[in-house]
Each structure stands twice: as structure tokens, then as C-alpha cells.
Amino acid sequence: MHHLAVCTADIKTQIAFFADVLGCELVALYWMHGVKDAWHGFLRLNDQCSIAFVQSPKIAGIPHEIGVTHAGNAAGPVAGGALQHLALRVPDRPALLALQDRIRSHGVPVIGPIDHGFCTSIYFAGPEHLSLEASFSDAPIDARAWIDPDVVARAGISAEELARFTAPAPFAAPADREPQPPADGPGPHLVYPPEPYARMLARSDAETERKLSETAPPVAVEPATTA
């Protein structure tokens, strides 16, 4: 995962929680590219992965409703396509217990550890009803042990589909780039007003990159030097 973006009505509170309580470094905070009046903040999980927050004026006016907009805990339901809970990785059990102590030292209750067989986890809440988990695994998940035939059948997955899902077909990039599917195709589709969306899809990739890219950081920094 490169980053997971979460909406917030109070980016300072989210940054304070992830920095002070969880120990994640704030590495970016800037006007979100191409989005009017929106801020984008990134907190480092590792050199390739971040948790990101987006704040814009409309977010504060959207009510929280447990079971609809938010799950409320790592077992609760939420609308399809919405974040149910976020699990953060730690390297081992001592690190998990140290994180549990750090979280509790800030007055945040923590449930666990709970051993799930392929990972051991603790559970706690973040600001704005964000449901959080921290986990470690001693080994990669063994699909032979953890794909339940009963659940496969209940999900309507056939034997042929299961074989495809557990060993996805490789893809060889074609000599000529794949054309953009049309705005009225089967999708799924991003949700934009129909006319602007059709115009976006009608552009070439090169034109989109040229028009929408913003590569300059908000603060000029001298290149790092090595001794």
C-alpha cells in the first residue's frame, strides 16, 4: 500500500493522534492538488507507505452515523466501499505490547492482544470514530489453511474462480498502450459530473499528466549533501 486516504473535519487532531499516540512522523501537509480548499496530510508508516488525511470545508457538515458512515469498531458494519477498520503493522509481539502501552499512556483504551492464528492484534479507536488495529504476523498467510470451503461456497465462488483468484493470471504489457475505456462503459467508475468526466476520459494520458501534475513542493529545500 502506498497510502490510505481518510477524510477528516479536524486534520490537526488526527495528526496529533497519529504522531503523539502512535509515533508516526508528519512528512507532508499541503493544499491538495487539484481540489479547491482541501488540505492533504501524510504521516509516515515506512519509506513506501503512509496514512493520509484530507480536510475540506464540506466534510464537517457530513454527520457520523455508526453502522452507515462508520463501523464504530473492527467488527461493526458500514456501507459497502467505506473503510471498516485500518490495521497497522508492527514487527513482532514486543513491539505490539510496547505500542499498546504507548496508546494506553495517552488515555486510550486498547482491547487485546488477540491471536487470530495468522496474526496477533490489538484494537483501539482514533479520532472521529476511526476504528484502528495494530498487528504482527510471524509468517506469510498460508492460503491452503485459511481459505474456508464453507465461506467460499457462501460467497458463490466456483472452483474455477477460486483457482483464478488464488493464482491471478500474469499480464504482459502490450506493445501499444491499452486504450481508455469509455465513460458509458461497464466500469466501475469514479463519481464526477457526467460531462467533466467524459472530457477527462477523452484526454490522452500525456495530456492529463501535463495538465494536472504539480511536482513542486510548497517549501523550497536545498538538496541533501553527503560528507
Image: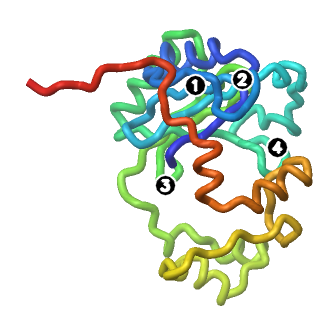
Residue receiving disc 1: 41
Residue receiving disc 2: 55
Any mark on residue 117, and which? Answer: 3
Q: Is residue 131 left or right of residue 140?
A: right
Tag 4 or tag 3, which sits nearer the N-term?
4
Tag 1 or tag 2, which sits nearer the N-term?
1
Q: Is residue 48 left or right of residue 75?
A: left
Q: Position of residue 114 (x, y in %)?
A: 53, 41
Q: Is residue 36 left or right of residue 124?
A: right
Look at the numbered discs 1 and 3 and tell me whether their residues touch, using CB distance below 8 Å: no
Tell me the distance, in whole angstroms, between the alpha carbons under discs 2 and 1: 9 Å
Tell me the distance, in whole angstroms, between the alpha carbons under discs 1 and 3: 34 Å
Any mark on residue 78, and which? Answer: 4
Tell me the distance, in whole angstroms, between the alpha carbons under discs 2 and 4: 21 Å
Any mark on residue 77, and which? Answer: none
Q: Between label 4 and label 1, give the one nearer the viewer.
A: 1
Look at the numbered discs 4 and 1 and tell me whether their residues touch, using CB distance below 8 Å: no
Q: Position of residue 134 (x, y in %)?
A: 51, 36
* Residue type (three-letter) at the residue carrying disc 4: Val
* Residue type (three-letter) at the residue carrying disc 2: Gln
Q: Between label 2 and label 3, give the one nearer the viewer.
A: 2
Q: What secondary structure is marked by label 4?
A: loop
